Amino acid sequence: MAWHQDGTTHWDAPDWDPDAHGFNFMAQLYPSTPGNGVWVLPGSHRLGRVDIKRLTTESGSERITGAVPLICDSGDVIMTNRQLVHGSFANSSPDRRVTVNAGFFARKRVLGVTTELLSGEEVTFDEARLKERSRMISVDIDARRQRFPDESSYIYRPGIGQEDENRWCEDTRRSIVRNYNLRDMYI
């Protein structure tokens, strides 16, 4: 994946800030090394939209000066700002490279935004859509509660009072969890 910053909206917003595009969780299924992993340019999330072509030209190669690899073990989760300049090179190691990625956004950054889903369908993220999309959080919490009943559960405030409709069961697996990724948005 070539050098890039996540985010297609909000770059020119009057209230832009270094967290405008949220953050990513990247779960590593295999160890991440300089040869097979993601590289980042520390601090670049604070610079706004970065001229990546200029950076590579000034660096004299695709290896941007100052970039560092994210090194971790299998099972580790890396959290990064989505505006951070990041990318990965061709896997030059004998090791596998598999990352499960999930992006999160501040509510104020998605409410009212019109964008495309993975299917190409254009949608607006209104209150009803955000409420439906966030049900996954409550279902996940309940699934963990069922698996680890002696553990103190996280309390997701927007889901208070909706626990019964967001129980982990076969119905919610089909209606909420199945194909959840098809509702992903790009902002």
Image: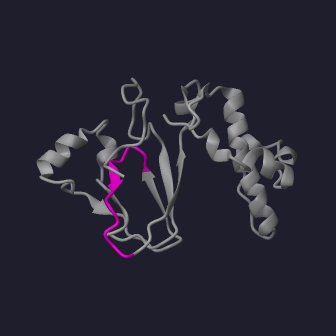
Q: Is residue 73 above or below residue 183?
A: below
Residue at left offset 71%, top offset 35%: 131
**Which quadrant of the figure has residue 182?**
top right
Residue at left offset 42%, top offset 27%: 15
Tally of marks: 0
* Frontmost residue, 55 versus 13: 55
User: Residue 125 in the image: x percent, y percent?
Assistant: 62, 28
Q: Main secondary structure of the magenta part?
A: loop
Residue at left offset 48%, top offset 72%: 30
User: Residue 79 in the image: x percent, y percent?
Assistant: 47, 57
Looking at the rendering, the stretch of residues picked out in magenta corresponds to 81-94
* Frontmost residue, 120 versus 138: 120
* Residue 85, magenta (yes or no): yes
User: Residue 171 in the image: x percent, y percent?
Assistant: 85, 49
Q: Is residue 25 above or below residue 181?
A: below
Residue 158 horizontal side relative to residue 168, left or right: left
User: Residue 94 in the image: x percent, y percent?
Assistant: 37, 76
Residue at left offset 63%, top offset 39%: 183
Residue 154 horizontal side relative to residue 2, left or right: right
Instruction: Single out the residue that lies furthest toward the right.
Output: 164
* Residue 152, magenta (yes or no): no
